[in-house]
Amino acid sequence: MPDKAGRVAVVLNGNARQVTEQLAESFDQVVGSGDLFLSRSLDDAQRIAEAIVEARYPTVLTGGGDGTFVHMVTSITREAKARGGEAPRFGLLKLGTGNSLARSLGAGTTRGGVFADLARLRENSSHRDFRLIEAQNLLTPFAGAGFDALGLKHFHEVRAVVRHLPFVGKRATGAVSYAISIPALTIPELALRPRIHVRVINRGNAAERLDDAGRPTGRPIARGDLLFEGSCIAALVSTVPYWGFGAKVFPFAESRPPDRFCVRIVASHPLHIAAHMLSAWRGTYRHENLLDFFAEDVELEFDEPTAIEIGGDPEGMTRSMRAHLHPDPIRLIDYNAL
């Protein structure tokens, strides 16, 4: 395969709603023939990763949401390391449903904005080092169990129905499906079903409990000690402030130390959160049963098999999830700095 030094590889999720045949053709013309890759499965992701590393692309852009980024950055960095090389710098195109990381980096929100982002990065090679969380062998900006995993399940169920509605289907965005699924399905089910029971164990250097302003409070939590044990509706980890569609679920992520990620335990009653949905969305919701920490490495142990999500994609049921800050930062394009 010819050396692609100086070129930009664009990887699009062929299953994403916004990735139409017309959009793919437009990208193919902009980035150049052979530099556009369409992924529709994990097998595709691995094949594409091998081709990108072999061709030595210096920059890789992913389009299709956080899940697309998670699987591509995991496959590409591992392939590069296996070959003894350096992973390329990564950027995101805001073409998926969640786009939490793309939002944090200032990626464009329209089709015109996406192409403008591509033009800007061609003229500017700046990037910043960014640490990801490794959870269940995937590199991700966020992951969790409970409310978020259940919410994603309901979102996909509602979206599958909405997409086939006459007139509405072509116009409805992912945000519409979230607006329907969370209050209509997720909150009621959480109110009726037993909560998850979790033990959150510190497996790394000292962790810190945070107060309502995001400042460390109390004594450090030593390796092997518990951050939390009990019932909750969600146990979450993240290095970025946002969840899907701009919900600021991790308001202290921007002030975290570079060697820590955020841990949030939501033990509030789901109906109380529903009554304060706007403040929860904005990141200003506070409650004595909403617990925040900075940690380096944690293990979540569940009493029963529990649904988890990683990077906004459902990852099945498990009795435990290990999440630790990946030691090697990735080079990430920050559109706010271009």
Image: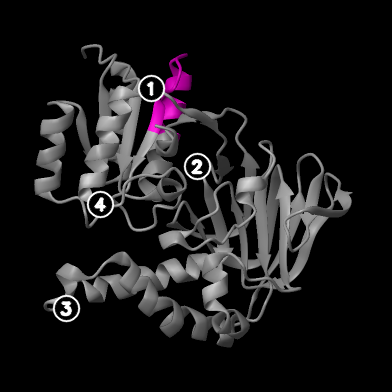
Q: Earlier in the sequence, mark 1 or mark 3?
A: 1
Residue 84 inside the magenta-drawn segment: yes
Task: Give the SS element for disc 4.
Answer: loop
Measured as percent of width and height from the top left, residue 65 is found at 35, 50
Find residue 110 and name its label: 4
Dots 3 and 2: beta carbons under 8 Å? no
Q: Is residue 38 visible?
A: yes
Q: Residue at x 50, y 42 (%)?
A: 138
Find residue 125 and name its label: 1
Q: Which residues are magenta?
A: 74-90
Tell me the mark number nearer the camera, choosing from 3 and 4: 4
C-alpha separation, residue under disc 1 versus residue under disc 2: 26 Å
C-alpha separation, residue under disc 2 versus residue under disc 4: 29 Å
Indicate the amino acid at tag 4: Thr
Q: Earlier in the sequence, mark 3 or mark 4?
A: 4
Residue 33 inside the magenta-drawn segment: no
- Looking at this view, is 248 or 54 the one in front? 248
C-alpha separation, residue under disc 1 versus residue under disc 4: 23 Å
Give the quadrant of residue 169. bottom left
Q: Earlier in the sequence, mark 3 or mark 2?
A: 2
Badge 2 crowding class, 10 Å Cα cut-off, few under 14, some 14 to 19, many 20 or more, is: many
Q: Earlier in the sequence, mark 1 or mark 4?
A: 4
Indicate the amino acid at tag 3: Leu
Residue corresponding to mark 2: 138
C-alpha separation, residue under disc 3 versus residue under disc 4: 24 Å
Task: Give the SS element for disc 1.
Answer: loop
Q: Is residue 39 visible?
A: no
Task: Give the SS element for disc 3.
Answer: loop
In this figure, what is the number of numbered marks? Answer: 4
Badge 4 crowding class, 10 Å Cα cut-off, few under 14, some 14 to 19, many 20 or more, is: few
Indicate the amino acid at tag 1: Ser
**Left of 237 or right of it: where is 138?**
left
